[in-house]
Amino acid sequence: MAQKMKAAIFVEKGRIVLDEKPVPDVGPLDALIRITTTTICGTDVHILKGEYPVAKGLTIGHEPVGVIEKLGSAVEGYTEGQRVIAGAITPSGHSYACLCGCGSQDGAGTRHGFKAMGGWKFGNTIDGCQAEYVLVKDAMANLSPIPDHLSDEQVLMCPDIMSTGFSGAESGGVRIGDTVVVFALGPIGLCAVAGAKLMGATTIIGVDTLASRMEVAKKLGADHVIDFKAGDPVEQIMALTDGRGVDVAIEALGTQGTFRSALESLRPGGTLSSLGVYSSDLTIPLGAFSAGLGDNKIVTTLCPGGKERMRRLMEVCASGRVDLKPLVTHRYKLDDIEAAYDLFANQRDGVLKVAIEP
């Protein structure tokens, strides 16, 4: 095995570069994964722009698809050469958070002046997977074998985007017959549309301004799409719901404006399910919040991880009920990841997700 590997490394605000690093050593409970496909996430762009702080020299990326290269001495139930994925969130399985049923918050603590994102370790608190290899800790809690009949691209959304989008609908408590609005139809918002449909929503409204994204939303289950540049989106939502409002509003962008619109679009007693990563303080508008008397819920979600979550998501992929392959609009080699970041960060050429292959 090569002693050095290529990796996308955070250097400073505005710079993620391809460089070399040592291949990680494997501890007893670890697994070394040779990456076959990964991708760039919107959160990685927050890191690039300095909106989410990480340590200089960190390898970025948290969406690994690959092959087991080497297993730790205590790892059981897996074989070297096996195709696997691991979630963006990698709970240990034995922390207080995990045993409280909230494995996504495993490891949460104060860092850089605010609460670190729990079990999100890859490309956040440890080296990530935009590299030739990634070390997966607590491998038996996190590695999920890929069924032979599923391709890398079919499962590429499972580690983060699919899990996050679906969890927006799950945390929001979507029920059969619900009306749901999804604000911002980027990859996470599009997966939220698909998740809401799977959970039984019968009217799904997507809000964006890019025609290409609105078309994909329709294919994934949106019954109506609203161009927020064509008029006040809340007024358009109220018109579609005969003034009733929606049961669940999913915020998938992370801005004050979309948060406010999501809150204003709720029916009395409705739920705002927030998925966006916010880069500044939020204000809860008095009127939209009904002065605290509207019986509304505001819930936040960090996408669930662990091998059982990944298994379930791959079952969804295998069922054919949701096809997320169209979300991959561009493909780059790892050698060209700096160009891929430039494309993705600037949202050029209709990009949704970029597949990166070492």
Image (cartoon, rainbow, N blue to C red):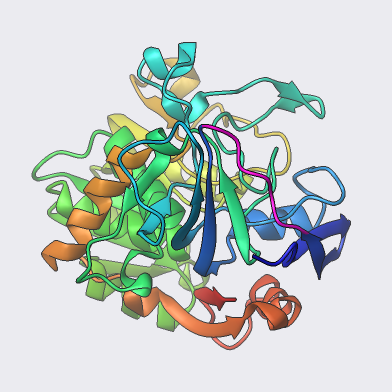
**Front in this rendered view, residue 71 or 244:** 71
**Residue 23 included in the magenta stretch of the image:** yes
Q: Nearer the viewer, residue 165 or 355?
A: 355
Residue 12's x, y, as percent? 90, 56
Q: Magenta stretch containing residue 49, yes or no?
A: no
> Quarter holding the N terminus?
bottom right
Residue with the most extreme right position: 12
Boundaries of the magenta span: 22-28
Image coords of residue 194 (percent x, y) = 26, 59
- What residue is rendered at 70% in x and 83% in y? 336
Figure quadrant of residue 131: bottom right
What residue appears at the point 32 percent right and 33 percent down from the top-left corner? 171
Is residue 198 shown left or right of residue 326? Answer: left
Does residue 16 appear in this view? Answer: yes
Q: Is residue 101 left or right of residue 55?
A: left
Compared to residue 234, the image places residue 296 above or below, namely: above
Tell me which residue sits at (21%, 39%) in the image.
174
